[in-house]
Image: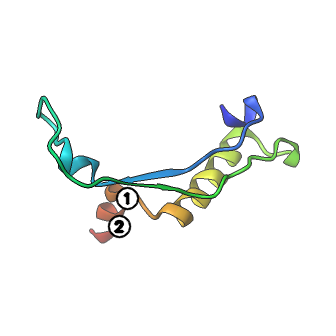
Amino acid sequence: MAMEAGVPILPVTIHGGHRIWPPGKRFPRLGRVEIVYHPLFVVDQNEGEDQRAHARRATEALQAIIGPSPNTAAKAAQ
């Protein structure tokens, strides 16, 4: 979508959200949440790659900034 719209992607990491509003709870609890805004990631439309290649490159670049998702890290540990 970002490539089609010609807009950059702003990666954001939210730490602690699962502690203050755990699944199954109706209301959040008091607690600390940290929001980290990472550098913009620009998708170049003129590189001649297809959308899947752009998506793969974007995912790899974002994982390098943010780190692997907990699901990805758990699978790699097995």
Residue at 43%, 62% (x, y): give it.
68
The one of 8 and 33 positioned closer to us in this rendering: 33
Residue 5 in picture, x, y percent from top left: 74, 29
- Residue 46: quadrant of the picture: top right
**Side of 50 where 14 appears, left or right:** left
- Residue 23: quadrant of the picture: top left
Q: Which residue is mark 2?
A: 76
Q: Residues within 10 Å of mark 2 (few under 14, many from 20)?
A: few
Residue 14 in picture, x, y percent from top left: 38, 51
Task: Give the residue type that dot 1 points to.
Answer: Thr
Residue 70 in picture, x, y percent from top left: 32, 58
Dot 1 falls on a residue whose secondary structure is helix
Dot 2 falls on a residue whose secondary structure is helix
Q: Assign the C terminus to one quadrant of the image.
A: bottom left
Task: Give the residue type that dot 2 points to.
Answer: Ala
Residue furthest out toward the bottom: 77
Q: Residues within 10 Å of mark 1 (few under 14, many from 20)?
A: few
Up/down of 11 relative to 65, above or below:
above
Residue at 71%, 39% (x, y): give it.
51
Residue furthest out toward the front: 30
* Color encoding of the figure: rainbow
Residue 27 in picture, x, y percent from top left: 14, 32
Residue at 16%, 42% (x, y): give it.
22
Q: Assign the N terminus to one quadrant of the image.
A: top right
Q: Which residue is mark 1?
A: 72
Up/down of 36 relative to 50, above or below:
below
